[in-house]
Amino acid sequence: MTPILIAEQVLNGLQSGVMLFLMAAGLTLIFGVMGLINLAHGSLYMVGAFAAAATAAVTGSFLLALVAALAAAAAAGALVERLVIRRLYDRDHLDQVLATFALILIFSEGTRWIFGSFPLYLDIPEALSGPVTLPGGIQYPLYRLFIIGMGLVVAALLFWLIARTRLGIRIRAGENDREMIAALGVDIARLYTLVFALGAALAGLAGALVGAIQSVQVGMGEPVLILAFVVIVIGGIGSIEGALVGAILVGLTDTLGGIFLPQIFGLFMDPAAATQTGAALASMAIYVLMAAVLVWKPTGLFGAKS
Amino acid sequence: MSRERLLGAVVLLALGLVPLAAHLMGEPFTITLATRAAILALAAVGLNIALGLGGLVSLGHATFFGIGGYAMGILASHVQNYEPMFEWPVLFEGSTSMPVIWLVAVLASALVALLIGLLALRTSGVYFIMITLAFGQMFYFFSISWSRYGGEDGMSIYVRNGFPGLNTLDPIQFFGLCYAVLCLVLLGAHLLARSPFGLALGAARQSPDRVQAVGLDPKRLRLVGFVISGAITGLAGALFADLNRFVSPTMFSWQTSGEIMVFIILGGVGRLFGPVVGAAVFVMLEHWLGDMSEYWHIWLGVLLLAVVLFARGGLVGLIAGRERAHD
C-alpha cells in the first residue's frame, strides 16, 4: 500500500463527501425550516441528472447542462412544494413519509415513461477530461478535482447565504419561530417555496455532477438519499455545519473502508476469504459509524440538545 | 359489532373464500395472489404493532422481512446442497421443516429488532425514521456482498419446505397454512392491544410523560413492542420466501419497507384489519393495474397521495368512519 494510493482514495472519499453534502444540506435545511422529512429529495437529484443528460445530448454543452439541471430541479421542487408538500407541514411525520414516498413512485415511473429504462450517459467535457499530476506525483482525474472544487465553492456560497444575506436571516428566523417572522411581515409561504427550491437545486446540481461519472438512470437518487440521511443523523438535523462534517466523514469512511478493510483482513486470513469478509464489512462501515455517533451523541455531532 | 369490525370480518372472510372458490374452479394463480396478500398482510400486521400501537414510524421493517426470508434460504439451501451448516457440537444439516424455519426466523428477527431498537430508540421522530431506514439499507448491502448465500443474485430453493401433515406444494394447502397463521397473529395482535402491555404501549405513544409518572418506562415498552413487531414481520418474510421459493436482497430493500408501510396506510393506521385491507387492495391493484400499464406505480403513487392528503384513516376509515383515527 503506497502513500499515492492512500492519497488517491482520500481524494475519492472527499469527492463523494462533497456531493453528499449538496444532498444533505438541502434535506437538513428543509427539515430545519419547515420540519419536513422529504424522501423525494433523491428524485430531485435524479431530475437534475436527467435534465443535464438530455440538455447535453441536444446542445453538447456541459455548462448549459449544469444550468438546465439547476433550473429543472428547482422548478420541479417549487412545483411539488406548491402542489403537495405545502399540505404536509402541519401533518405528522408518518404522513410526510408516505406522501413523499408516493412522490418517489410518481417521479421514478414518470421518468421511466419519458426516457425509458435504459441508462443515459453524460460525457465529461473535453476541457475537464483526462488526468492531472498533483504534487507528489499523484495522477488524478481532473473532473473529480473539479467536482471537489465545485462542491466546496457551493458549500462556501451556502454558508455565506445563510450567515450574511437577508434571505439567510429569514431562513434562520424561520427555523426559530415561524409565527414571529410571519407577524413581522415575511411571506412565509413564499419563503418555504424558496427554501424548498433551493434544496432541490442543490440536489439537482449534485445529480448532474455525479451523473457524468456514473450512469444516469431511474432509481439513482434513493441510495444517495439514504446516505444523506446517515449524514444528517451523524451531523445533527438542521445543522449545515453538521451536514458538511458528516458528509466528509461518511464519504471518507465509505471509500476508504471499501479499499482498506479487505487488505487489513488479508493480513491474517486467506485472500479470498479476506476479500469477502472485508467487502461485506466495508458495506456496513458507515452504519457502524452512525451507530457509534448515536451511542455517543443521540442528536448528532452538531445537533441541538433535545 | 362496530362497522369497522364488520368490515374487517368481511374482508378476512373474503380473503379466505376467494382462493377456495378459485381452487374449485381450477385457477391456481388466483390462489397464489391470495397467498401473497395474506403473507404481505401478516408483515403489515407486524409493522402495525410498532406503528399504530407504539407510534414508532419504522421505515426499516424490510430488515426483518429479509431476515425471515434469509432464515428460510440459508437453512433450506444447506439441505438442498448436502452441506451441513455446522458439525460441532452436534451435526446440524439445516432444515426444510417450516416450524423449525419459522422458529429461527422469529428468533433472529427478534434479536436484530432488539439491537436496532436499543440504538434507534435512543432517538425519536425524524431521527428514528432515518435510522431504521439506514439500518435496513445496511442489511441490504450486506446481503448483496455476502456471496456465500447468493450475493446479488439471491438463492433459489427448488422444493417448498414441508409442514407436518400438509402437502405444501399444493397451492390451496399452502394458502390455508398462511391464512391460519394470519388469523392467529391477528387474534394475538387484538389480544395484545387489549392487554396491560398493549394499553401501556398505546399510552406511551399518546403521553409518554404520564406513563412515566405512573412508574412505567416508555422506552422499555417501545423496545418490547418493536421486538414483537419485528418478529412477526420476520415470520412473514419466511413465508414469503417459501411462496416464491426464492430469496434475494430485494427483500431487504427500502422499497419493501415503504410498501409494507403503504399497506397499513391504504388500510388505516392502528386499525386491527387495516393491514389486511391494505395488502389485499395492493395485491389487486398490482395485478390489475400491472396488466393495464407497465407504469402502474405512477397510479399507485397518485392513489397513495390522495389517501394521505384527503382520506386520513385510510380505506377502512373512509368506510367505517374515523372514530379510531390515529393521532
Image (cartoon, coloured by chain):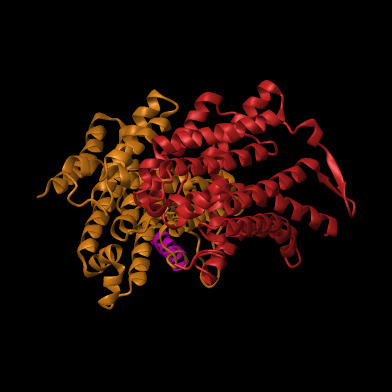
Q: Is residue A234 shown in magenta?
A: no
- Where residue B140 sits: x, y (%)? 53, 51
Count of marks, rendered view? 0
Can residue B210 be seen? yes
Chain that the image shows in red: A
Q: Position of residue B96 (x, y in %)?
A: 43, 54
B214 is higher (above) or lower (below) than A135 = below
Magenta segment, principal secondary structure?
helix
Q: Which residue is depicted at the point 25% across and 66% down? A: B203
> Residue drawn 23% across and 36% down?
B18
Say which residue appears at 21% left-offset and 58% top-offset.
Answer: B190
| Residue A119 can be seen, yes or no | no
Viewed as shown, does residue B171 lie left or right of A57?
left
Q: Quadrant of the C terminus of chain B?
A: bottom left
Chain that the image shows in orange:
B
Quick check: B247 left or right of B164? right
Left or right for B36, reference A164: left
Q: Which residues are magenta?
A: B103-118
